[in-house]
Amino acid sequence: MSVVIRFNTVIVRKARIEAAYPGGLDQYRRDFASQSNDYYEDANLTVRTSMSGFYGDWDRLMESGLIHEKDDTVVDIVTADQSNGVDPRCDWLESIECCGIPVCWLKEKDPRYIVDCKPRRFMKRVPQSACPECFNLFTIASAAQAVDIQEHRSGPLIIVRENPMDYGRTQFMVSCSHCGHETEFDDIGRQGPKKGI
């Protein structure tokens, strides 16, 4: 999968979060993803985006043992922005422009579908919903990795909404972390397709 670069962006490799962040990836998600519309992830990367800065979050990541740069090379955490794309010193990401917006993915992995921001209500409700196939609750990861239904049908690397907050009639495809079953959700976190999508 691949991720959109919105505004100011911090991208962290999941493998390094699991190794260095206290409590691993599960705690990282609880700290940064729960009920947030500025967090999303693909199979290999986590993304935080902000129209301004990250204030105490950056220090928190550094204190956890994650490394931004060493010997002028980006190590675990890379910064990016919508105007300039990914820091050119990062050798572990591939990037392109899609619909005029930068998109990136972990090098040597399949970019597949594009993952982007979701509404806060969506991020809160999806993990409270049960998968219709295995009846386990969806996870924060399931919500964070959900793909716009138009991208899911037409992609990969096809659809990026110009305005990430213009949800309106957006529908998302959510994959269950337990069984892999795919379920449609609307933009406020209700299961089932919207008419006309």
Image (cartoon, grey):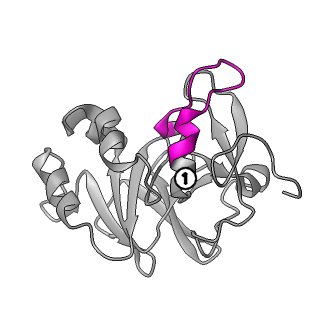
**Going 47% across and 39% down the picture, which residue do you hit?**
140
Residue 45 image offset from top left, x and y in percent: 41, 48
Q: Is residue 135 magenta?
A: yes
Range covered by the magenta-colored residues:
124-141
Q: Position of residue 47 (x, y in %)?
A: 40, 55
Residues 59 and 138: in front is 138
Question: Is disc 1 surrounded by few (<14), some (14 to 19) or many (20+) residues within 10 Å?
Answer: some
Where is residue 86? Give x, y as percent. Answer: 38, 68
Residue 46 included in the magenta stretch of the image? no
Determine the residue positioned at 75% across, 62% down.
169
Say how many tags the image has.
1
The residue furthest bottom is 83
In the image, residue 160 sits, relative to residue 140, either above or below, namely: below
Q: For this view, does 27 lie left or right of residue 108?
A: left
Please indicate whether residue 124 sits to the left or right of residue 59 in the image. right
**Quarter in which the C terminus is drawn:** bottom right
Residue 86 showing in the rendered view: no
Q: Which residue type does callout 1 highlight?
A: Arg
Residue ID at (13%, 44%): 65
Q: Is residue 106 left or right of residue 31?
A: right
Residue lying farthest to the top in this orientation:
134
* Prevailing secondary structure class for the magenta stretch in the rendered image: loop
Q: Is residue 28 visible?
A: yes
Which residue occupies 32% across, 51% down? Answer: 12
Q: Taking 173 as reference, is 77 above or below it?
A: below
Helix, strand, or loop for circle 1?
Answer: helix
Q: Position of residue 147 (x, y in %)?
A: 64, 50
The reply, left or right, for residue 57 in relation to residue 126 is left
The residue wearing badge 1 is 121
For the residue pair 77 and 53, the one nearer the viewer reads as 53
